[in-house]
Image: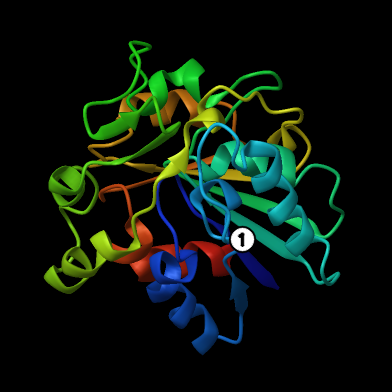
Amino acid sequence: MRVVFVHGACVRDGAWWWHRTAELLQERGVSSVAPGLPSCGEVGLPGGFSGPGLAEDVAAVRQVLRTGDEPTVVVAHSYGGIVTAEAAAGIGSVRHLLLVSSYLPEVGQSLSDFGDGDGDGNGPAPFLDVDIEAGTFGVRPELLVDTFLQDCDPEVQAQAADHLARQSVQVTGQPVGAAAWQQVPSTYLVCAQDRGTPAALQREFARRAGNVVEVDAGHHPFLSRPTVIRDLLLDL
């Protein structure tokens, strides 16, 4: 089995965000990879209106999924669910989707349909900083820990700000062209203490998934509760 991790919005260095779970999987002989998302500046191109968007993120993940034919589980976090909905469609090696506090769009839906962060439909969430002129958005550093990492240890909280990114704002309005979760078996992990994506919104998305699991954790359980994520993956 191989695991492909797809990170959320406004971060870079995907391997760092997943490292605690990836290390536990490696101890059990399960390899993993975390593709970079171009819209977050991870391929050297700056974000903005003319920068990479959702299509480039989808292409980057599909390229990794097409490398090798071993059975693959895709773990999508938050905005990563938008990317994965299209990127994992039609890839025969993908056997399961694990959606962690993830947006789960129907074909034709985009991130902006869910309120750009908090699901209230009223525009950008208060923890986001949107620069209209530059065409980018990002997490406000002063709200990072309290919103997304309140249940993580101090080491993770101290390091996380170094792995934030300004992302192309165009990804918020670009619709997906496929919904892999409609064809691929899926499990939705609801994070009950998530202050970024409310649990109520997660539970709405979870209705679209085949299975639902709930954990008493914040937005990043793969950092705060990595053994839970490892065990869930090994059980799939």
151 on left or right of 75: left
71 on left or right of 120: right
Q: Secondary structure at mark 1?
A: loop
Is residue 140 in view from this perspective? yes
In this picture the colour scheme is: rainbow
Residue underneath mark 1: 236
Name the residue: 64% across, 56% down: 74
Is residue 185 in view from this perspective? no
Name the residue: 52% across, 50% down: 46
Q: Residue furthest top?
A: 122
Q: Which quadrant does the C terminus fall into?
A: bottom right
174 on left or right of 14: right
Rendering quarter of residue 60: bottom right
Name the residue: 48% across, 31% down: 169
* Amino acid type, label 1: Leu
Where residue 52 appears, as percent x and y from the top left, is: 62, 43
